[in-house]
Image (spheres, helix red, strand yellow):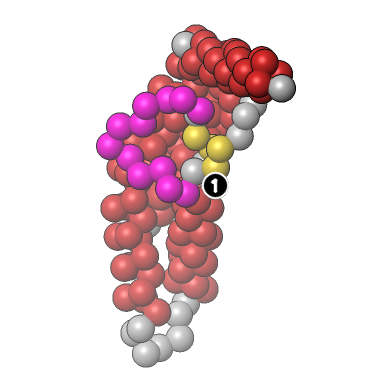
Amino acid sequence: MQKLIFKNILLILFFNSLIFSCNSNSVNDPQLVEAAAIHEEALKIGEDVQPLIKELVQRRNSLSIQGRALTQEEQNFVDRIYALESSFENWKNNHIEVPGANHTGHNHENGSKLNLPPSEMLSMQKGFKDSILVIKERAEKLSRN
């Protein structure tokens, strides 16, 4: 009986080390390394865009409290800021972390964790970055109005 328990423990340790080594190797996968770099770039862009969005929200709030009816142009501007703010919040709250990546200087408490193949994770991170670039472009365009 003790031999059986010992064999089971050895078997469990073997499978755990096998699983751990597979996970460790995947961290070194070039596609995951690239995905992590893209993820960090996107988060940095998001940090840079956030003050611009806050400024636009302040402009929106200033328009909204004037005590008069807004012109159609002003209302369109307000609506576009609401949409931009919503897009940014959705982007910020729905990002996917790259498993095993060392994320520096960012709060990832909102990030989801998915176990995707490296090629899919890379593709997802490219989309994540593309999304924040579109949000940035929209924010810059609105700030020029």
Relative to 8, residue 112 above or below: below
Of residue 5 and residue 40, the one placed in the foreground of this image is: 5
Q: Would you say residue 36 is visible in this rendering? A: yes
Question: Is residue 7 placed above or below 74 in the rendered structure?
Answer: above
Q: Position of residue 66 (x, y in %)?
A: 34, 84
The image quadrant of residue 3 is: top right
The part of the chain drawn in magenta is: 99-110
Q: Amino acid at mark 1?
A: Asn
Magenta region, main secondary structure: loop
53 on left or right of 27: left
Label 1 Cα neighbours within 10 Å, binned few <14 / some 14-19 / many ≥20: few
Q: Nearer the viewer, residue 145 or 55?
A: 55
Residue shown at 34%/51% (left/top)?
50
Q: Is residue 127 magenta?
A: no
Residue 106 belongs to magenta span: yes
Residue visible at 38% across and 70% down? Answer: 60
In the rendered image, residue 130, in percent from the top left (x then y), is placed at 52, 33
The spot of residue 137 in percent (x, y) is 43, 42
Can residue 15 be seen at all in this image of the molecule?
A: no
Q: Secondary structure at mark 1?
A: loop
Report the residue that reaches farthest toward the front. 1
**Horizontal and vertical percent for residue 41?**
38, 29
Question: Is 53 situated above or below 23?
Answer: below
Q: Quadrant of the N terminus?
A: top right
> Is the residue 85 above or below the residue 44 in the image?
below
Question: Foreground residue, 59 or 47?
Answer: 47
Q: Residue at x 46, y 40 (%)?
A: 132
Residue tagged 1: 94
Nearer the observer, 75 or 83? 83
Query: Image quadrant for the C terminus?
Result: bottom left
